[in-house]
Amino acid sequence: MSILVEAITVIFRNATADALIEGGVATIRDNPPNNTYRTDGVLSAVGFMTPEDTEHFVERLKDVGFRFIEKGKSMDIAVCDQNRGFTANCEWLGTNGQHLNNIKPRHLRCGIMQALLPNYNIIRDCSSVGSKRNNAE
C-alpha cells in the first residue's frame, strides 16, 4: 500500500478515521477539503499549498480526536512537506527508499509513503461532522 506525497501532505490511517469520525472514511471521501484527497485503502492523504491551509485541516482532525505530535512523534496524523520533510518523526510510515539530505530512510521528505502497521480520507469542515467520541459522551 502506498500514497503519493506532494506539496504539503497530511497523511492519516483510515482505521483512525473510522474509529473517530461519524461515518468514518466514507464521510471524508464524500466531503474532502479539496480535490487532492486520495487513499490506498489503508492510508489517506490530502495535499495543501500553504502551511495555513494545512494547519486548519490538522486542527479539524484534532477537533474530532486525532492526535498530532506527542513527545516529538507523529501519532494519528503525519505532515510531510516535499521540500522539508516530516514535521515530526513518524514510526508508522516508510518510504520508497529514496534518501535525501539528512532525513532518515524511513522518513523521506517526499515520495511514496507506505503503512508500516497494516491495521493501522478528510472533511471540508470536520466541525460539521459528528465525532464518535463526542457523541458517546
Image (cartoon, rainbow, N blue to C red):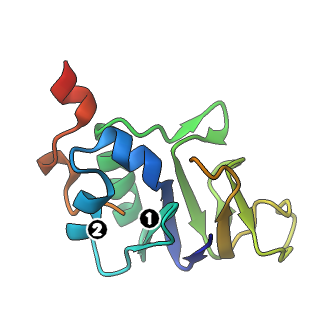
Instruction: Name the residue beneath numbered marker 1.
Output: 51
Residue lying at 42% horizontally and 77% vertically, measured from the top left: 49
Quadrant in the picture for the N terminus: bottom right
Q: Is residue 32 visible?
A: no
Q: In the figure, 68 relative to 55: above or below?
A: above
Q: Secondary structure at mark 1?
A: helix
Q: Nearer the viewer, residue 60 or 17?
A: 17
Residue lying at 37% horizontally and 62% vertically, measured from the top left: 52
Q: Which kind of residue does numbered mark 2 sit on?
A: Arg
Q: In the figure, 98 relative to 66: above or below?
A: below
Q: Is residue 126 visible?
A: yes
Q: Secondary structure at mark 2?
A: helix
On screen, residue 19 versus residue 81, left or right, reads: left
Q: Position of residue 62 (x, y in %)?
A: 36, 41
Residue lying at 71% horizontally and 70% vertically, measured from the top left: 109
Q: Position of residue 44 (x, y in %)?
A: 46, 64
In this view, the residue farthest toward the left is 128
Residue lying at 85% horizontally and 59% vertically, measured from the top left: 104
Q: Nearer the viewer, residue 115 or 99?
A: 115
Per the model, the C-alpha gap separating discs 1 and 2 is 22 Å
Badge 1 local density, few (<14 within 10 Å), some, or many (20+)? Answer: few
Q: Which kind of residue does numbered mark 1 sit on?
A: Pro
Q: In the figure, 45 relative to 88: above or below?
A: below
Instruction: Name the residue beneath numbered marker 2.
Output: 29
Total number of numbered discs in the rendering: 2
Q: Position of residue 53 (x, y in %)?
A: 34, 65
Give the foreground label among 1 and 2: 2
Q: Nearer the viewer, residue 47 or 129?
A: 129
